Image (cartoon, helix red, strand yellow):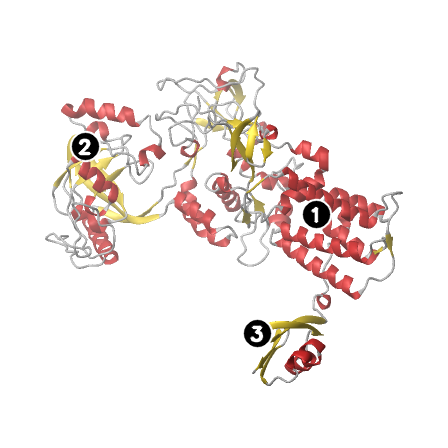
Amino acid sequence: GTVLANEEVTADGRSERGDFPVYRRPMKQWMLRITAYADRLVRDLDLLEWTDAIKAQQRNWIGRSTGARVRFDTPAGPLEVFTTRPDTLFGATYMVVAPEHPLVAALTTPDQRSAVDAYVASAARRSDLERQADAKEKTGVFTGSTAINPVNGEAIPIWVADYVLMGYGTGAIMAVPAHDERDHEFARAFDLPIVQVVTGPEGTDVQAEAHVGDGVAMASANAEISLDGLAVAEAKAAITEWLEAQGLGAGTVQYKLRDWLFSRQRYWGEPFPIVYGDDGEPRALPADQLPLVLPPMDDFSPKTSDDEDSEPEPPLGRVEGWSTVELDLGDGPRPYRRELNTMPNWAGSCWYELRYLDPTNDEAFVAPENERYWMGPQFDGDCGGVDLYVGGVEHAVLHLLYARFWHKVLFDLGHVSSSEPFRRLFNQGMIQAHVYRDERGFPVPADEVVADGEGYTYQGRPVSREVGKMGKSLKNAVAPDEMCERYGADTLRLYEMFGGPLDQSRPWDTTAVVGMYRLLQRIWRLFVDEDDGTPRVSDEAPSDDTLRQLHRTIAAVRDGMETLRFNTSIARITELTNHLTATYPDGGVPRAVGEPLVLLVAPLAPHIAEELWARLGNPDSLAYQPYPEAMDDLLVDEAVELPVSINGKVRARILVPADADASVLEQTARDDPKVAALLEGATVRKVIAVPAKMVNFVVG
């Protein structure tokens, strides 16, 4: 077995990878203090060009809360809680501690011992997600002890319940059932008192339902302080100040984020460059003994067990001659025991973008000048980082958060000039596929399904069709190699980019691939004679119309590239290809238009573009050519076609200069034979002429 982080445990208490049962137990592990960066990780999200949804996920995961820590006296000593609503202290009628809280044993009275022990053991088999599920029935057990509410001196019972987590706050809460829904459910389940301390709308009945909305404090006074009549914000400030003056608590900021568990009991991971002496203290290996590499192993599978009392066994502990070693760390040769845990996969994925900048450097993970050139800030206030990161939303609170923390540590140590790893983030959609299921609901091979006029069948039996993920288990995977073999890699690339906006998911459709294949064929035929393979270009000057088509295409393609709307870029290339095919049916596309078209195609279909570039007589790769830029004066129409209406109904169309004013529009419209015939003998009461838009005659 191995230790996992909370994020790697599913809602039903099993490992995300392998689906093994997960048990809770205290262990000594390596941790990274990500909590020290919690504020910066939240604040610096404002510097990033990320979607609001991803930013919200990170903010919620970090979970910054402002409130107060409050101390309650108990028979086992002070019990501290964190609350975001100190203004409701007078309404606290019981306390709840997490099953893992260190005071549980001391708080439990002899007559409650067996019940509490059984409950704690049961809770250890549940994941945090299970324990916090809103729909879950509230469970708990009374410890037999009480705590003293510091604001009114009342003794309130202390319960153990699994909806309180040791990983957030202090692992204990003061329960105010009148103004918290979960506390209210628990109080109703165990018949605990419910006391209202915040006013609600007329008819509010906190015995029936918690009031969690705004109001003013009520029933909240003692001999030294009264909150009655204060709004929530004022009451929070007043009670916090009083608690601090009495030495009973203090205002504070709390995070849901916990320090990062960084140990794994498996072979495949970076070994820690740590050894232990006879005193058990960890010592870092000196630089001249780095890097520490994994020893070879024939069987490096971790030990697995369904027994919750089993101990994790790191595979490295089975390597004789490596797990123990004699080293001279400055005080003479001595025997040492190596750290047998390894690092998680995040140890590599948190900084791979930096290594890409300098992959062969043996002296540093990246040369400072390389990092500054590729990832450094570009202007004052810029956080720097990778220009564009394309990745799925599933990385929001794992890889992306860990990488940001890792990068900030490197920034603070002076190793990088950028304070963030990824300046811009784009979440791509998923290529889906049709899933076909038989009458039992089991997937059947998609490539063996037959479509007829009435539906779909597999081996003669009807099947249902739905859109879902693509994968082996659903028997609908499409092998890219097969598509490349049949249509070529460029066709596959174009199809994937043409299917729609990059951030949208869409189903794979093999029949639609043919459309992109035919587009590439048409582009090829523009430039290459199908009979003898010779180039079909000319050095003649293109017409003004063709030049305008080219430069409009350049502008549109560049815009599509910059905004990641590749489908619109391909659509405009298709339009230009169709124009050239119609204008030059016998070949002879002007080189001044053909070469820019090939360069436009290159990022989308690089193989055919490179081949065409060579066929056009260019000795060097097109990769060294600048990408085409549109000429602004060719993006403006010299003439525009406008509708002419009579009483709001379009009767004709006229061609006028793009900058024609209203008087020119009216006269041109009157001169049109069709319009003139319709106006003959009619009384024109009003003429509406909008430049570059339309002309309308109102007749009576």
Please state if 129 lies on the left or on the right of 299 as rendered: left
- Reply above or below: 428 against 281: below
Q: Nearer the viewer, mark 3 or mark 1?
A: 3
Q: Nearer the viewer, mark 3 or mark 2?
A: 3
Question: The residue under label 3 is which amino acid type?
Answer: Gly
Q: Quadrant of the N terminus?
A: top left
The residue identified by callout 1 is 603
Question: The residue under label 1 is which amino acid type?
Answer: Pro
Closer-to-camera residue (671/498): 671
Q: Cβ–Cβ below 8 Å for labels 1 and 2? A: no
Residue at 23% over, 44% down? 70
Q: Residues within 10 Å of mark 2 (few under 14, many from 20)?
A: some
Determine which of the numbered discs, if any, sits on residue 648 in the image: 3
Q: Earlier in the sequence, mark 1 or mark 2?
A: 2
Closer-to-camera residue (211/54): 211
Mark 3–mark 1 distance (CA, rounded to whole Å): 47 Å
Residue at 50% over, 15% down? 318
Where residue 10 appears, as percent x and y from the top left, is: 41, 31
Q: Residues within 10 Å of mark 1 (few under 14, many from 20)?
A: some
Where residue 252 appears, as percent x and y from the top left, is: 30, 48
The residue identified by callout 2 is 76
Residue at 47% over, 27% down? 439
* Residue 473 appears anywhere in the view: no
- Reply above or below: 22 against 188: above
Mark 3–mark 2 distance (CA, rounded to whole Å): 87 Å
Question: The residue under label 2 is which amino acid type?
Answer: Ala
Report helix, strand or loop for mark 3.
loop
- Examine the image and state in which quarter residue 26 appears: top left
Report helix, strand or loop for mark 1.
loop
Where residue 16 appears, as percent x and y from the top left, is: 45, 29
Please state if 592 lies on the left or on the right of 145 as rendered: right
